Amino acid sequence: MMTLLHLVLGDQLSHSLSALRDAKPQGSVVLMAEVMAEASYVSHHKKKIAFLFSAMRHFAEELRGRGFSVRYVRLNDPGNSQSLFGEVERALADTGASGVVVTEPGEYRLMDEMRGWQARLGVPVEIRDDDRFLISRAGFGRWADRRRELRMEYFYRDMRRHFSVLMRDGEPEGGQWNFDKENRKSPPKGLKGPRRLSWRHDAITRDVLDLVEARFSDHFGQLRPFHFAVTAEQAEAEFEQFVTEILPSFGDWQDAMVAGEPYLFHSMIAVYLNAGLLLPLDVIRRAERAYHEGVAPLNAVEGFIRQILGWREYVRGVYWRFMPDYAGRNAFGAHRPLPALYWSGNTKMRCMASAVRDTIEHAYSHHIQRLMVTGNFALIAGLSVDEVCEWYLAVYADAYEWVELPNTLGMALHADGGLMASKPYAASGKYIDRMSNFCGGCSYDIKDSTGGNACPFNSLYWRFIAVNEDKLRGNHRMANILAGWRRMNEGKQTALLNRADDCLALLEKDAL
C-alpha cells in the first residue's frame, strides 16, 4: 500500500482541512512540526508561539484519537531540521511515502517555497485550496476583474447576497447594508468589559510555556499569564460567551478605547479563526441566529459579521491578488526608522503607551487601536512601511501576513496609494479624544497644536497634509482638508511644522 504524507501547518488546525480530506488511518501519515524557521522569521510575540505550539500539540492528540498516524516533531526533538522543508524531507525518507499533500499556506513566502518542493523532493506535492475561507483566491480574482475599484463595501454586499446572511426578501435586514454610524459611541466614564473565560494549563500547555520561556526569551512580549484557548472546544466556549454575554454591547462600543480595558466588548476570536480552531461560516451563522433570537441588536451583529464575511475575506483576496509586488508599495515614500517606543511602550503619549503596553501584555489590541493609534501615528510620522508592517506581524497573536499586510500597508498606512481605502486614515488627536479616555490623563495637551506641550498627533497630522499635498490633491475626499490647510495663515502653518519637527526630533531620541 502506498503511503501519502499529509502536512498540517500551525495555522491549519481544522479537522475539515482540505489536506486531511482523504487521509486515512491506514496508508496516511500526518506530519506536524514545530520549526525555528517559522517561529523566528520575525520576533513573534511569546504568547503567539506558545498558543500555536500548544494548539498544534492538542490537535495532534485529537488526530491520534481519531486513529490517524501522526508524526509530530517538537522544536527540541533530536534531529529536527528546524525548517518545514527539512521535516518533510526527513519524513519522506523515514516513511517511504510516495507523495505530499498540503493545504495552501497563508503567506506568499511559504507558498513560493512550496511551489519548488516537488522538484527538490522528487515526489508529487499537491497543494490544495484552503476551502475554510468563504471565497477562493480564484473567486476573488473573478470578482475583482469586474470592478474598477476594489472597495470592501461592495465585496461585502456581494458576499451577504451569496451566503444569504442578514437578508430578507433579497434586501439587507433592517433596510441598510451597514450600521457603522451606530457603532461609534464615545465611551462613558466607567465603561468596562466583562470578565472573560480562563483555562487551567494542562501538561501540554505547561511544557510549551517552559519551552517558549527557555528558547524565545529575547522575543517580544510577556508570556505569562497565558490566557488563550488551545483547543476547538475551548475556543467554541469563548465564542459562545461572546455571543450570549458580550455581543449585545459590541456594536455601540466597538470603536471605543478605554485605558486599562484592552478587550472591552470585542470577540477576541481572530486568533482562533486564523489558526483554524473556529471556522468563519459557523461563527457568522451563530451571530446571525443571535439577532433573529433577540439576543443581540442588529447594529452589533451586522458589525461583527462585517469583520468576518467582509474584511477578513476581502483582505485575503487583496493580498493574494497583488503579491508579491504589494509588499513593496510605499505611496508616501515613508522611511523614518521605527522608534523604540513601539517595542517598549515608553512614551508620554498616553494613547500610544496604552496600545503598546496592552500588546506587550496580551499580544492583542483591538482594531481601532491598531488603525487609529499605532497605525495613525506611523502614517503621520512617516515611519518606514517595511518596519511598521514587520512590527504588526510580530506583535499580535492573530497576525499572519495575508491579514496583516493589507490591513497595515493598505488601511493604516495608505501605502498602496488607495487600492483599499478611498482616503488615508490620518487623524489629529481630536479623534482619539472623542473615542477614548486617554487624553484627559495625558502629559500632552490635546487642545494645543503648536506649543511645547501640544499633543504630537495634532502637528504631525498637519505636517502629513503639508508634505503630501501634491499626492493628496487628486483625492476628492481630501479636498476640504487641503483647503483648510491653504486657508491657514503662514504663521500658523510655520508653528505647526516647527512643532512637528520638534516632535520628530524627540521621537528619534526616544523622548516623545
Image: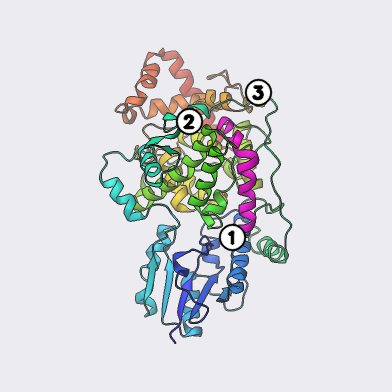
Q: Of 355 and 130, which appears nearest the observer?
A: 130
Look at the image and give the residue range highlighted in magenta.
229-254
Instruction: Say which of marks 3 and 2 sits in front.
Output: 2
Observer-nearest of 140 and 37: 140
484 horizontally vs 442: left or right: left
Callout count: 3
State the SS at label 1. Answer: helix
The residue at which mark 2 appears reads as: 180
Q: Nearer the viewer, residue 96 or 120?
A: 96
Which type of secondary structure does the marked residue at label 2 adopt? helix
Q: Residues within 10 Å of mark 1 (few under 14, many from 20)?
A: many
Q: In x, y percent, where is residue 227? A: 68, 52
Q: Is residue 73 above or below residue 329?
A: below
Q: Amino acid at mark 1?
A: Leu
Work out whether residue 28 or residue 10 is closer to the camera in this orientation and state it.
Answer: 28
Whether the residues at callouts 3 and 2 have beta carbons within 8 Å, the answer is no
Quadrant of the snapshot with the N terminus = bottom left
Q: For the view shown, which residue lies furthest in the front direction?
A: 169
Magenta span has 232? Answer: yes
Q: Earlier in the sequence, mark 3 or mark 2?
A: 2
**Within the image, what quadrant is residue 22 found in?**
bottom left
> Which residue is rendered at x = 65% and y = 62% of the image?
212
Is residue 124 at all visible to an observer of this figure? Answer: yes
Instruction: Classify mark 3: helix, strand or loop.
Output: helix
Residue 75 makes an appearance in the image: no
Q: Position of residue 30 (x, y in %)?
A: 52, 74
Say above or below: 61 vs 198.
below
The residue singled out by tag 3 in the image is 440
Q: Residue furthest bottom?
A: 1
Separation of residues labelled 1 and 2 (CA atoms) = 33 Å
Amino acid type of the residue tagged 3 in the rendering: Gly
Provide the residue designation for mark 1: 52
